[in-house]
Image: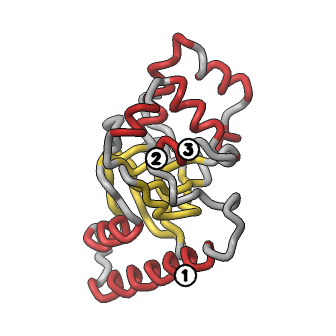
């Protein structure tokens, strides 16, 4: 079913307004609630109270320097709570030296080359009649769609993650906090 272009435009306007309103309301929150946009690089942003596991993944696969100096990258950053889909045993297994390649696959599946802001994602969804596909650094695709006013990412296995905090800008890219871990099909 084709979405009329005017409907897509209105949807984008509504979503942009909702995201702008959300960003404005963040300024009244304590700094511990959201990522600090004053930091220099994506790598330093992942070293936060809500991203301990993701930062541990970055360190385990030796990508600290890449995320500190290269870019631009867009990182869909799962919170520590997002990793609850894994048991403690599964996480421990992923962090074993022999599974370093799997861990790197998982991390790079949460990254897209370039500076992909929420408004760029919304424009791509409008052009794609309600959905947009993005190729991750890992090489597989993720699909972005709207559910209400939320941008939702769907992996190749059907798992979904909502962007809960969008457009945290850094010198080498942008971070979007997500509420679930997305998985590549070849993990």
Mark 1 residue crowding within 10 angstroms, few (<14) / some (14–19) / many (20+): few
Mark 3 residue crowding within 10 angstroms, few (<14) / some (14–19) / many (20+): many
User: Which residue does the numbered mark 2 point to in the structure image?
Assistant: 42
Q: Observer-nearest residue: 166 or 24?
A: 24
- Residue at figure coordinates x 49%, y 79% from the top left: 20
Q: Is residue 30 left or right of residue 125?
A: right
Q: Is residue 185 left or right of residue 72?
A: right
Q: Observer-nearest residue: 186 or 15?
A: 15
User: Which residue does the numbered mark 1 point to in the structure image?
Assistant: 21
Disc 3 and disc 2 in contact, CB within 8 angstroms: yes
Residue at mark 2 to residue at mark 1: CA–CA distance:
24 Å
Residue 29 in percent (x, y) is at: 69, 71
Disc 1 and disc 3 in contact, CB within 8 angstroms: no
> Please, is residue 3 above or below residue 41 in the view?
below
- Residue at figure coordinates x 55%, y 12% from the top left: 97
Mark 2 residue crowding within 10 angstroms, few (<14) / some (14–19) / many (20+): many
- Give the quarter of the image for residue 125: bottom left
Disc number lying in front (1 or 3): 3
- Name which of mark 2 and mark 1 comes first in the sequence: 1
- Residue at figure coordinates x 56%, y 63% from the top left: 165
Disc number lying in front (2 or 1): 2
């Amino acid at each position: 079913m084709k979405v009329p272009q005017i409907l897509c435009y209105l949807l984008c306007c509504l979503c942009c307004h909702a995201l702008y309103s959300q960003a404005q309301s963040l300024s009244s929150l304590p700094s511990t609630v959201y990522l600090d946009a004053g930091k220099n690089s994506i790598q330093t942003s992942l070293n936060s109270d809500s991203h301990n596991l993701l930062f541990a993944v970055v360190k385990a696969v030796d990508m600290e320097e890449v995320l500190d100096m290269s870019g631009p990258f867009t990182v869909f950053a799962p919170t520590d709570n997002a990793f609850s889909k894994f048991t403690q045993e599964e996480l421990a297994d992923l962090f074993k030296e022999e599974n370093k390649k799997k861990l790197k696959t998982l991390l790079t599946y949460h990254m897209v080359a370039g500076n992909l802001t929420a408004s760029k994602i919304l424009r791509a969804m409008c052009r794609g009649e309600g959905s947009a596909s993005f190729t991750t650094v890992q090489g597989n695709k993720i699909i972005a769609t709207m559910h209400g006013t939320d941008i939702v990412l769907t992996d190749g296995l059907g798992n979904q993650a909502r962007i809960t905090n969008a457009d945290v800008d850094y010198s080498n890219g942008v971070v979007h906090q997500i509420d679930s871990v997305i998985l590549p099909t070849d993990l």
